[in-house]
Amino acid sequence: DIARVAIGSGADAVALSIVLADDDGGLDRELRELRNELPRSIGVIVGGRGASDCTDTLREIGAVQLSDTRQLVTTLENM
């Protein structure tokens, strides 16, 4: 359980890489559930080739969407 581990470890953020988004809405549902399980103090950072397929959901949950791996370091430094 990603949220439980993130909370228990005192993480500032959870970073996910989406390789392939599904067509049945399962990924969108899981992203919303993850955001609901995490306190707002823990950010959600998402990258990967499939992230662009769920941009609306990422925006809805307040996730930071990365366009490349170089942004990851900058994003983490700003948290």
Image (cartoon, rainbow, N blue to C red):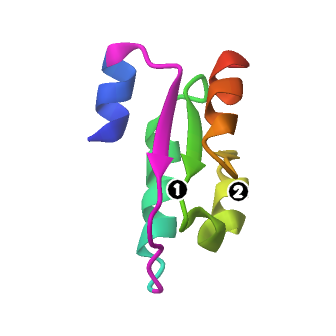
Which secondary structure is most common in the magenta stretch?
loop
Q: Which kind of residue does numbered mark 2 sit on?
A: Glu
Q: Which residue is mark 1?
A: 32
Proximity of marks 1 and 2: CB atoms separated by less than 8 Å? yes
Identify the residue at image location x=69%, y=29%: 75
At x 58%, y 63%, the residue is 51
Q: Residue furthest bottom?
A: 23
What secondary structure is marked by label 1? helix
Residue at left offset 53%, top offset 57%? 48
Residue at the spot of label 2: 60
Q: Is residue 19 left or right of residue 50?
A: left
Residue 19 position within the rendered picture, expressed as x and y whole percent measured from the top left: 44, 65
| Quadrant of the frame with the N terminus | top left
> Percent x, y for residue 69?
60, 42
Q: Is residue 54 above or below residue 37?
A: below
Q: CA distance from mark 1 to mark 2?
A: 8 Å
Q: Residue at x 33, y 39 (%)?
A: 2
* Range shown magenta: 9-23
Instruction: Assess whether residue 40 is covered by the magenta stretch.
Output: no
Vertical arrangement, residue 11 with respect to residue 31, above or below: above
Instruction: Report the amino acid beneath label 1.
Output: Arg
